Image: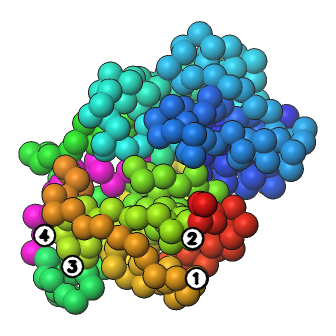
Amino acid sequence: MSVALVTGSGGLIGSEAVRHFAGLGLDVVGIDNDMRQEFFGAEASTAWNVARLTDDLGGAYTHHSIDIRDRNALAKIFQRYGRDIAVVIHTAAQPSHDWAVRDPFTDFDVNAGGTLNVLQNVREHCIEAPVIHCSTNKVYGDRPNSLPLVELETRWELEPDHPYYNGIKEDMSIDACLHSVFGASKVAADVMVQEYGRYFDMKTACFRGGTLTGPAHSATELHGFLAYVMRCNMERRTYNIFGYQGKQVRDAIHSSDVVSAFEAFFRAPRSAAVYNLGGGRHSNVSNREAFALAEKITGVEMVTEYREANRIGDHQWWIGSNEAFQRDYPDWKQVYDVPMILQEIYEANVDKWVPQA
């Protein structure tokens, strides 16, 4: 028996990983206690996704509703499967800047402590298993905001001759910048994943994601940019724009493209690898441009409200470079771009996201 163990298995990337690795013939063990509902409220619950995974995959999927902060409960799972665990995909996290400020203890315990718990269990029970960690571009703090950005009609942009025009690379410093409480906890997790790779000679990778997106997102205001844009449009909600004239740029990568990168690493793992992973120049959009695309899909105008203050530590412009990952894994290819992503999100939710009476 070969087992893929997935933390955060009810979330966007976790559930995509469950389906993908089950499709490869692995038995998948999922860990998710629906903390997303505690973070963001009932509309962000992942329970529906867990139920769908269980129904669709049957015996190929086993779910455990435990907290990654619970060391004893987590250890029992690892002890049970032991060296049958062929890969660990760690997606469980507290993912919001704003929420982290409300409860920094929980944020750090989940993001940093939970990651350490996963790593130590791999070391003790299945040290040969590659560990794939969902990190974030927020480990770079607000350093990208120091780039010489130019204001265009619908977005902020770099000049084409800038070294990072085709995407920010992993050589960008993470020091001497503002990270936010969330960003700091994710830095701690990111560095610990690298350290277990180097110090204990484990196979580990930090994937520093841009905007990870797709139809399985339980979209809410504090997390889930593109899905939340489409949800607001479809439900006639007001979308709050936070600063930068709504011209802030995000690269967006579909969850399917993310987990295909995970598979590539699983098949040829390395030690202490670090990769930016996002939409790059292939798939990026500003708030204003996303609104226009959503309106084109639905034929309905966005309802927005502008707030002058940007979120603390938020990126004014982020397009990441996938060059390092593609150099190591040249067979990996991106499929989705932003219009495709928004169209799929719309089609997946057209019967669910309707205007409230």
Mark number displayed over residue 298: 1
Label 4: which residue?
147
* Outermost residue, top side: 72
Q: Quadrant of residue 66?
A: top right
Mark number displayed over residue 156: 3
Label 2: which residue?
234
**What's the CA distance linking mark 3 and mark 4?**
11 Å
Please name the amino acid that badge 2 sits on: Met
Disc tally is 4
Closer to the chain start, of discs 4 and 1, is 4
Between disc 4 and disc 1, the foreground one is 1
Which region of the structure is painted magenta? 135-148
Please name the amino acid that badge 3 sits on: Trp
Please name the amino acid that badge 1 sits on: Thr
- Estimate the x, y position of residue 215 in percent, counting from the top left: 63, 63
101 is higher (above) or lower (below) than 158: above
Q: Nearer the viewer, residue 149 or 80?
A: 149
Residue 353 appears anywhere in the view? yes
Residue shown at 16%/58% (left/top)?
A: 309
**What's the CA distance linking mark 2 and mark 4?**
35 Å
**What's the CA distance linking mark 1 and mark 2?**
7 Å
Q: Nearer the viewer, residue 303 or 161?
A: 303
Dot 3: element? strand
